[in-house]
Amino acid sequence: MGRTQERVHDATDIIKYVEDSRSAIRNSAIEALRVCRGDAAEDALIRFITTSTDSFEIMSANFVLATIGTERVIPHLLPLLDHPKGDIRHSALNALSELGDDSFLPLFII
């Protein structure tokens, strides 16, 4: 049987790699944040989705935010619904479906 990673509460050592110049390192750091909790991890991903230009990495960060994010993320996801890349729109919508409440239902009916 495989082991699952326990939650990490201090993501400081991972966060510093989210903005690494090497894409493989950034991708690994973003995925590693999936087991992290707390404002620092969430803030790092919010900063990333609002500043990055790499569609794949934004999409990955959105899926991680769907898992670890709180309502604080929602205002940063909403602009991504108008992104020119469908994958980014889809990942933002997925995160909103996980983090939002019934007030976001009209987004899913359109």
Image: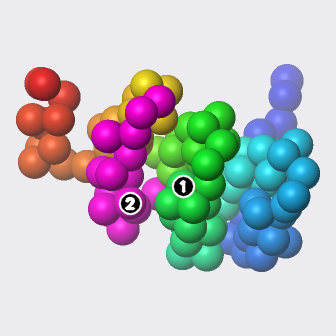
Specify the quadrant of the image occupied by residue 52: bottom right
Quadrant that contains the N terminus: top right
- Residue sitting at x 46%, y 45%: 66
Q: Amino acid at mark 1?
A: Ile
Specify the quadrant of the image occupied by residue 12: bottom right
Q: Is residue 94 above or below residue 21?
A: above
Whether residue 66 is visible here, answered yes or no, is yes
Where residue 13 appears, x then y in whole percent? 85, 71
* Residue 17 colored in magenta in the image: no
* Left/right of residue 52 with respect to residue 3 in the rendered view: left
Where residue 4 appears, x then y in whole percent? 77, 40
Q: Which mark is residue 92?
A: none
Front one among 40 and 55: 55
Query: Do labels 1 and 2 touch, CB within 8 Å?
Result: yes
Pointer 1 or 2: first along the chain:
1
Residue that carries the numbered disc 2 in the rendered image: 76
Specify the quadrant of the image occupied by residue 9: bottom right
Residue span colored magenta: 68-85
Quadrant that contains the C terminus: top left
Whether residue 38 is visible here, answered yes or no, is no
Residue that carries the numbered disc 1 in the rendered image: 49
Front one among 23 and 15: 23
Q: Quick one: SS at disc 2? A: helix
Dot 1, how many residues are within 10 Å of its Cα: few (below 14), some (14-19), or many (20+)?
Answer: many
Q: Quick one: SS at disc 1? A: helix
Q: Is residue 1 above or below residue 12?
A: above
* Left/right of residue 96 with respect to residue 101 in the rendered view: right
Marks 1 and 2 sit apart, C-alpha to C-alpha, by: 8 Å
- Residue sitting at x 51%, y 51%: 65
| Magenta segment, prevailing SS (helix, strand or loop) | helix
Q: Is residue 83 above or below residue 45?
A: above
Where residue 28 appears, x then y in whole percent? 82, 46
